[in-house]
Each structure stands twice: as C-alpha cells, then as structure tokens.
Image (cartoon, grey):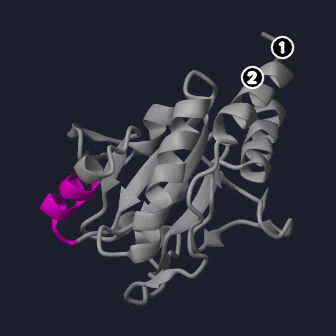
Amino acid sequence: MPSNCWIQKLLFTISIGLAPVALSGCVTSTSHHNPNMRGLQEVIQTEFPTVQGPRQSLAAYSGKIVMLHFFASWCSDCIGEAPSLSNLDAALRGSDFQIVGIAIDADPFETGSFVSRFKIPFPVIIDTQGELKQYFSVKDVPTTIFLDRMGVPVTFQDPETGTATAKLSGARRWDTTKPVEMIAGMIEAR
C-alpha cells in the first residue's frame, strides 16, 4: 500500500468523530532543575518499571519516532485525552512510530487502574521518582514530547496552532486529521 493510502485510510477511520478534549493542562508540582542531571543517553538507557510488568528503557524504541506522553491518573484532561491516544496507537501500529506513556503517579496501583480502565494499548512507564519528568522539565500534565529515531527530543509542529515547539502542554485530540498528518510527516521524514 503506498504511504499516502495508509494515511487516507487512517483519516477515514478516525473521522467517525470522538468527543473533544479540554485544552487546559493539569498542574503538577513544580520540578526544579538539577545541575547534576544525567545526560540524554544515560536517561534513554535507564530501565524503569512499567505497568505491563518488566522494566524497560526508552532505548527499546530506538529506530522509531517516539511520542512521550506524560500523564497522571488524577488529571481530568488526561482522562479526556486517553481515548484519542488509544485510537492513534491503533491507527499507526505497524509503522515506525511508538507512543510511550510516562505516568507520574506516586502510586503504581493508580497508574495500573488508569491503564486498565481506559484500555491503554501502548507501553506505560511508571515514573514514581520523577526522573523522566525532571529530565524533560515537565511541569504540567498532559505534556507531549517527540523523540527522533536516535532518542533525541525534536521540534515539531503543534497540530492545533501550527507553531513549532519542543514540548506540548495540554490535552489534544490526537486522532484527528492535523495531528495524524503531522506524525505521518515525522515518520516519513526522519
């Protein structure tokens, strides 16, 4: 199937219309900059606990465009956004793209309940110590960051405003035309 056909099929599939998501972010505790913060490669190689069981590092997704999506089980915007992320994951499964949820909940049980309740199909890392949150300077949830095939954070286009950004705070509808086209462009270009 030519690359544009899968994009068209995806857009048709998601055009059935899902409930909109609020655009404000849920505030988390302020993270302070740590001058002794580990380098990117060390962070990428560090293994973290996951909801699915085995510990895993972000290096496991080397060679793919990775959407790091920071969330919390108590965040109402994260709850509203969960279905569109699941739809995006299903639509792009099999491509060189991977969503990785980063749960900042202090209680892993709460994260597991959230993942089960919303049938989250993508891997979810539990960041109870806040290491990833701190490294990527995440202050609000939901927050989204994209990594290139080498695990390096990249600038991308906010699908809502069209402005270039390295980090997107606030909920989005990820399974609509603009975000899907933006991500498809990243997959094909990088």
- Magenta extent: 106-114
- Is residue 42 among what the camera can see? no
The residue shown at (46%, 47%) is 100
Secondary structure found at label 1: loop
The residue shown at (57%, 82%) is 24
Going by the numbered disc 1, the residue's amino acid type is: Pro
Residue bearing mark 1: 2
Q: Residues within 10 Å of mark 1 (few under 14, many from 20)?
A: few
Q: Is residue 81 magenta?
A: no
Q: Observer-nearest residue: 136 or 188?
A: 188
Q: Residues within 10 Å of mark 2 (few under 14, many from 20)?
A: some
Residue 6 numbered mark, or none: 2
Locate residue 57: give its quadrant. Answer: top left
Q: Quadrant of the C terminus?
A: top right
Q: Quadrant of the N terminus?
A: top right
Indicate left or right for 120 with 129 as reference. Answer: right
Indicate left or right for 60 with 130 as reference. Answer: right
